[in-house]
Image (cartoon, rainbow, N blue to C red):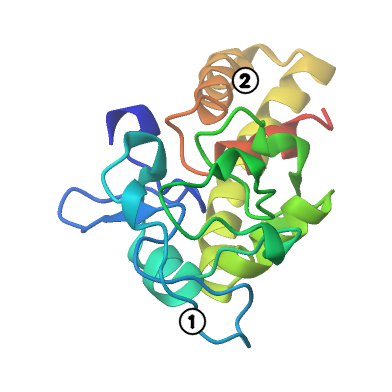
């Protein structure tokens, strides 16, 4: 969980000290579904069940309520059904949190809402429910904090009010920490701050 900074691999929500995280199989191990309406197809990617590159820490909502066995491919006919196949030939529509592709190229944020800029981003947002109400509320709470800190810095920069200097320096440091990988919802914060 250290490499994920105690955050869900998909929604960036943080794990609390006593909250359980699931071990997520990016490619589902037992069975797969192309979309929510499809029937389960067996087998899943059983041979990848203990492969590090297929395992992530995930919040229980993203794993159990949203993704479950969903693993959409651009061309479902190319789905590998045994350990004899090459999963490198598949073209998953769901972004791999630890893959070579930067998720920020596919998902951006407009305020607290995730927006897909590619079909991979759109599919990932849909499959994982990245705009579900509870997650929007958590992001909104974080965004309000960031907006307050940003306002302090902007006022100080614009007016140079000496009494605000200490607050502005502290706010700047907090904003810099808010875009580091270990910070909650750092992708959303980075998109918000890019406008300043």
* Residue ID at (67%, 68%): 126
Nearest the eye: 54 or 120: 54
Nearest the eye: 152 or 29: 29
Nearest the eye: 123 or 137: 123
- Secondary structure at badge 2 equals helix
**Horizontal and vertical percent for residue 194?**
79, 29
Identify the image quadrant of residue 2: top left
Mark whose residue sits in front, 1 or 2? 1
Rendered view: 52 above or below 172: below
Which label sits on residue 164? 2
Q: Residues within 10 Å of mark 1 (few under 14, many from 20)?
A: some
Which label sits on residue 88? none
Rendered view: 144 above or below 176: below
Mark 1–mark 2 Cα distance, whole angstroms, equals 59 Å
Identify the image quadrant of residue 145: top right
Using residue 176 as the reference point, say whether residue 14 is left or right of it: left
The outermost residue toward the front is 84
Q: Which residue is mark 1?
A: 40
């Amino acid at each position: 969980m250290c490499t994920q900074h105690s955050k869900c691999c998909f929604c960036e929500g943080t794990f609390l000290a006593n909250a359980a995280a699931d071990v997520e199989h990016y490619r589902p191990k037992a069975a797969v579904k192309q979309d929510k309406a499809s029937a389960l197809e067996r087998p899943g990617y059983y041979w990848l069940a203990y492969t590090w590159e297929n395992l992530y820490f995930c919040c229980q909502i993203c794993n159990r309520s949203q993704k479950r066995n969903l693993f959409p491919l651009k061309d479902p006919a190319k789905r590998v059904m045994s350990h004899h196949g090459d999963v490198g030939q598949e073209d998953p529509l769901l972004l791999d949190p630890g893959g070579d592709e930067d998720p920020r190229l596919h998902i951006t944020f407009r305020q607290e809402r995730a927006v897909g800029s590619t079909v991979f981003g759109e599919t990932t947002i849909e499959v994982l429910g990245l705009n579900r109400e509870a997650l929007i509320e958590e992001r909104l709470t974080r965004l309000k904090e960031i907006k307050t800190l940003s306002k302090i810095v902007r006022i100080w920069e614009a007016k140079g009010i000496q009494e605000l200097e200490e607050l502005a320096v502290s706010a700047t440091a907090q904003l810099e920490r808010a875009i580091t990988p270990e910070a909650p919802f750092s992708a959303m914060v980075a998109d918000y701050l890019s406008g300043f």
